[in-house]
Image (cartoon, grey):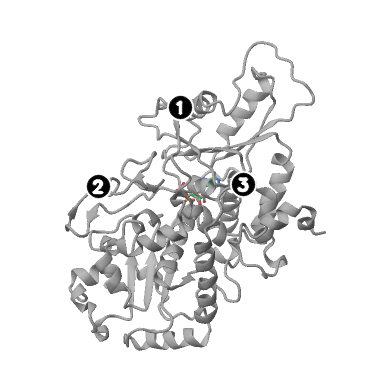
């Protein structure tokens, strides 16, 4: 019954190079230790420093997590409203917000922030975080208890008087409070790091502000972005980040694999689909189609663009009007398409049925679902979205759509440098249709452009070689 006993290599890699802690109950989260059976051999080893920091974090989470004695103590302090100075446990609470891809990226960013600042990460379960993911930390939950006193999370937005930016703007707090006046600091602050944040909120990314935030025990964070690239520009974190991630383009890859284990429900969808349609292929090609057009598709220009990319880059064989013999022994190339609509899939599948390929290769085409439109509030909808992101991460070659966090999650978990379909303008296929990504890292869509020292605007994509502008969004930042 235990597939894991089958291969020595699988056993060796079961903990993903030491990334995962051993000793979890396997049945309650099958994906945690079985994912290795579906993935290629480990290509990017996590650093020993990262492994040590994760184990240290797990110990902290055990000590300070929900319903521990220390947790209850800080909750009392939170209720009293007084910041009596440094406590044993400090927290960052992540608020569930936006589409699933955005959520996964902002949660990974928040976890890295927790690692860098010795805080404990707690997760607002939101609609369905508890149904989609296993618990990532041994011994204690990462979910925020229901009786958490500040549960009016809807009230935390850009206008909230408790936001760090607004408290600065209204001079309720200031950097002069840095030395020894903890009593004046609030016991919690809301960090508004969503795409519509303002210049005051963006001061989060300045070293001086980080020193101030260190003195606030509870931080509540809302973001729909992968804000990791800008953490790399804060001098305070520089040394630690370079030790944690000697390969700077592996941040989401490692943190994503550490944190996001599909629940048994989602894992069933992943493994059944994989075994039915992808397992026996010679090569698996993922194509993630996300069309940001308000009209309903499918659109011919999008289909043209996908095929131009797949053919130019030799990801798939072209078709021909000539007769070509295919041999029975040839294993197929399997194409996994994900899209809200079924039109592209039907076109591509029909094309490879109606015409032979120039190489004689057989191309089989599959799409797990077509949900038609985004329905973030529905559980089964998010289950499918998560299963599909994960399935894409199991492919050998990946094509993604510009601007889509859904694709970023797939590429990062898979350790894949995708071919990115450029964003079409005026309903025409761009030429060239796609480009190869510089790295497997996600793009930060809304970075600050501010030089904290000079107190002036600057292009933060030009400061260091490993933080650059993204291929698919000229003002975005990504690690390379
Ligand atoms: P983004 O909008 O592309 O950055 O990705 P998000 O994941 O944040 O939000 C898009 C949401 O739309 C997803 O979470 C899904 O709910 C839905 N969605 C978009 N594309 C697909 C798809 O190919 N398959 C499925 N099942 N859902 C999708």
The image position of residue 127, as x and y in percent, is 52, 64
The image position of residue 321, as x and y in percent, is 63, 12
Q: CA distance from mark 3 to mark 2?
A: 36 Å
User: Which residue is tagged 2?
Assistant: 459
Cβ–Cβ under 8 Å for marks 3 and 2 = no
User: Is 182 in front, or is 235?
Assistant: 235
User: Which residue is tagged 1?
Assistant: 301
Circle 2 residues within 10 Å: few <14, some 14–19, many ≥20: few
Can you tell which quarter of the image residue 86 is in? bottom left
Q: CA distance from mark 3 to mark 1?
A: 26 Å
Against 46, is 299 above or below? Answer: above
Cβ–Cβ under 8 Å for marks 2 and 1 = no
The image position of residue 435, as x and y in percent, is 44, 32
User: Is 444 in front, or is 46?
Assistant: 46
Tag 3 secondary structure: helix
Tag 2 secondary structure: loop
Circle 1 residues within 10 Å: few <14, some 14–19, many ≥20: some
The image position of residue 318, as x and y in percent, is 59, 20
Q: Say which quadrant the N terminus sits in.
A: bottom right
Labels 3, 2: front one: 2
Q: Name the residue furthest top.
A: 322
Asked whether, in this view, residue 291 is left or right of residue 40, the answer is left
Q: Please tell me which of labels 3 and 2 falls first in the chain.
A: 3
Q: CA distance from mark 2 to mark 1?
A: 34 Å
Can you tell which quarter of the image residue 195 is in? bottom left
Q: Please tell me which of labels 2 and 1 falls first in the chain.
A: 1
Can you tell which quarter of the image residue 424 is in? top left
Q: Please tell me which of labels 3 and 1 falls first in the chain.
A: 1
User: Which residue is tagged 3?
Assistant: 391
Please indicate, yes or no, whether residue 162 appears anywhere in the rendered image.
no
Residue in the picture at 43% in, 73% down: 119
Against 198, is 432 above or below? Answer: above
């Amino acid at each position: 019954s235990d597939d894991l006993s089958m291969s020595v290599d699988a056993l060796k890699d079961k903990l993903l190079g030491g990334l995962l802690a051993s000793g979890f109950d396997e049945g309650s989260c099958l994906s945690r230790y079985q994912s290795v059976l579906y993935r290629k051999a480990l290509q990017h080893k996590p650093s020993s420093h990262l492994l040590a920091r994760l184990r240290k974090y797990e110990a902290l989470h055990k000590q300070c997590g929900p319903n521990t004695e220390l947790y209850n103590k800080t909750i009392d302090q939170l209720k009293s409203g007084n910041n009596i100075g440094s406590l044993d446990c400090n927290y960052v609470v992540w608020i569930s917000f936006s589409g699933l891809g955005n959520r996964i990226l902002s949660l990974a960013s928040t976890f890295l922030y927790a690692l860098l600042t010795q805080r404990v990460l707690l997760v607002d379960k939101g609609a369905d975080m508890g149904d989609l993911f296993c618990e990532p930390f041994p011994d204690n939950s990462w979910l925020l208890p229901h009786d958490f006193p500040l549960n009016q999370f809807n009230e935390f937005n850009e206008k909230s008087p408790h936001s760090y930016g607004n408290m600065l703007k209204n001079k309720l707090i200031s950097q002069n409070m840095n030395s020894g006046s903890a009593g004046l600091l609030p016991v919690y602050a809301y960090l508004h790091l969503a795409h519509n944040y303002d210049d005051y909120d963006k001061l989060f990314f300045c070293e001086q502000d980080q020193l101030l935030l260190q003195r606030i025990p509870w931080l509540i964070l809302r973001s729909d972005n992968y804000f990791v690239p800008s953490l790399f520009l804060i001098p305070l974190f520089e040394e630690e980040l370079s030790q944690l991630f000697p390969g700077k383009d592996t941040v989401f890859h490692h943190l994503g694999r550490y944190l996001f284990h599909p629940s048994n429900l989602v894992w069933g969808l992943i493994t059944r689909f994989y075994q039915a349609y992808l397992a026996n292929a010679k090569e698996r090609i993922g194509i993630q189609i996300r069309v940001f057009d308000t009209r309903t598709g499918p659109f011919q220009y999008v289909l043209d663009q996908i095929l131009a990319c797949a053919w130019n880059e030799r990801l798939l064989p072209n078709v021909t009007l000539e007769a070509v013999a295919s041999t029975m022994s040839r294993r197929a190339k399997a194409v996994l398409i994900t899209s809200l609509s079924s039109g592209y899939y039907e076109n591509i599948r029909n094309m490879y049925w109606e015409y032979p390929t120039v190489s004689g290769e057989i191309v089989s085409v599959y799409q797990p679902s077509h949900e038609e439109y985004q329905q973030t509030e529905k559980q089964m909808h998010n289950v499918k979205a998560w299963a599909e992101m994960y399935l894409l991460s199991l492919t050998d070659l990946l094509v993604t759509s510009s601007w889509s966090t859904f694709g970023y999650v797939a590429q990062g978990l898979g350790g894949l440098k995708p071919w990115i379909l450029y964003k079409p303008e005026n309903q025409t296929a761009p030429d060239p249709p796609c480009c190869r990504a510089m790295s497997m890292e996600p793009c930060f869509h809304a970075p600050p452009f501010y030089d904290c020292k000079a107190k002036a605007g600057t292009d933060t994509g030009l400061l260091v070689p490993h933080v650059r502008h993204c291929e698919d969004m000229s003002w975005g930042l990504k690690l390379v």
